[in-house]
Amino acid sequence: MKSQRVVVGLSGGVDSAVTAWLLKQQGHEVVGIFMKNWEADDGDAYCASNLDFVDAAAVADVIGIEIEHVNFAADYKDRVFAEFLREYQAGRTPNPDVLCNAEIKFKAFLDHAMRLGAEKIATGHYARVRERDGRFELLKGADPLKDQSYFLHRLTQAQLSRTLFPVGELPKTEVRRIATTACLPVAAKKDSTGICFIGERPFREFLGRYLANTPGPIVDDRGRSIGQHVGLSFYTLGQRKGIGIGGLKARGPMRGGGDHGAWFVARKDMATNTLVAVQGHDHPWLLSNHLHAEDASWVAGHAPAAGTAAAAALSAKTRYRQQDAACGLSADAAGGRFELRFDTPQWAVTPGQSAVVYDGEVCLGGGVIAG
């Protein structure tokens, strides 16, 4: 690859640090950008943005590149966080990382990088881009344990054409080794988790700052009252911990088998403000053979053609860190909606989460689960 001006999103973590180091070693002109996207509670113990910038700046110093601190907090609040809250308020469980990638990292950040004269941008995501006949494909990361294509499925041809994922070709262990060998100061830093750009924090307490919580009844699959919930927005389908009924014993024979002592959130009735919980991991109410999704986004710009061999051999994930599940796809003519039918029932298919479709290692795109 010829030398290019590449703007790298430096987060203060090891993956983006190695991304920048690799590109510099390849002879590219590398510029680092640290994105600040959350400032509502900078003094909060859970907000590590300032510390992350110190780490990112230290990495840039070792590599010998410039770094710029850019504030996208207004964009994040308007484009990502507002939608995040709307979804929770409606009883769904959104995936902020998907929206954050589409609206901030590969839109606001990409636009800023282009204004700086970048030919490409790069991030520390575990995914790959492949060009074929002038079209771009999004591929899974080479490390199956770290693959992040699920979070990137809304990227377009225009975005992929300008994007590099250097660590997507590597296993995480090799990324750590490179960081150590290159004396990068974040070589041993643990991976971040939590809400995109907001970080790790007590989630119910955090949501409670922004959402009204109206308590209501918890009932079992027979309609019997088994407790009180603190507000439907604070629960997600398949949730086991924190429901508030953990000590309650089974009443008579249970359906679904499995661990009869464990309760799981199975349904949320917004109209009556009722939470439904069932016992047993494999309870029928937690299993689905099909789903329909909306707000679809296809990497190729259109849905896979119905009736083709490729469309008949697809798989999908309905949540991150899930094994691909064989499925059939039918999409409407405009491609904005689609339905998936699975060969085997899927567990706790959750409205608001993303259903992401694959053809082998190629991520085709996906949509938001509606039901």
Image (spheres, rainbow, N blue to C red):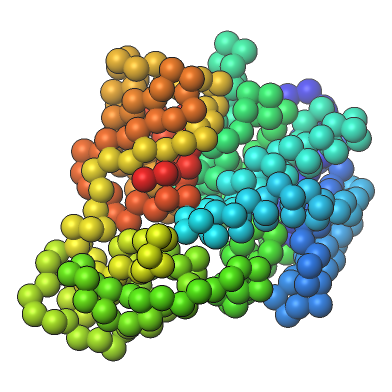
Q: Residue furthest bottom?
A: 247
Q: In the rendered image of this protein, does residue 235 appear above or below residue 320?
A: below
User: Could you tell me which residue is drawn at 62 percent across and 13 percent down?
Assistant: 134
Q: Residue furthest front?
A: 272
User: Could you tell me which residue is drawn at 78 percent across and 36 percent down?
Assistant: 110
Residue 347 location in percent, x, y? 29, 54
Q: In the rendered image of this protein, does residue 92 appear above or below residue 153?
A: below
User: Could you tell me which residue is drawn at 83 percent across and 68 percent down?
Assistant: 50
Residue 359 location in percent, x, y? 39, 29
Task: Decide which of 104, 8 is in the foreground and name it.
Answer: 104
**Along the horizontal axis of the image, is 308 left or right of 54?**
left
User: Could you tell me which residue is drawn at 30 percent across and 63 percent down?
Assistant: 266
Q: In the rendered image of this protein, does residue 158 appear above or below residue 195?
A: above
Looking at the rendering, in which quadrant would you find the N terminus?
A: top right
Instruction: Indicate the quadrant where residue 160 lies.
Output: top right
Q: Residue furthest left?
A: 253
Residue 61 location in percent, x, y? 89, 57
Report if residue 296 is visible in the image: yes
Residue 262 location in percent, x, y? 25, 76
Q: Please tell me how many numbered marks the rendered image carries.
A: 0
Instruction: Indicate the quadrant where residue 126 lies.
Output: top right
Task: Decide which of 192, 188 is in the foreground and name it.
Answer: 192
Q: Residue furthest top?
A: 133
Task: Decide which of 357, 148 is in the foreground and name it.
Answer: 357
**Along the horizontal axis of the image, is 192 left or right of 306?**
right
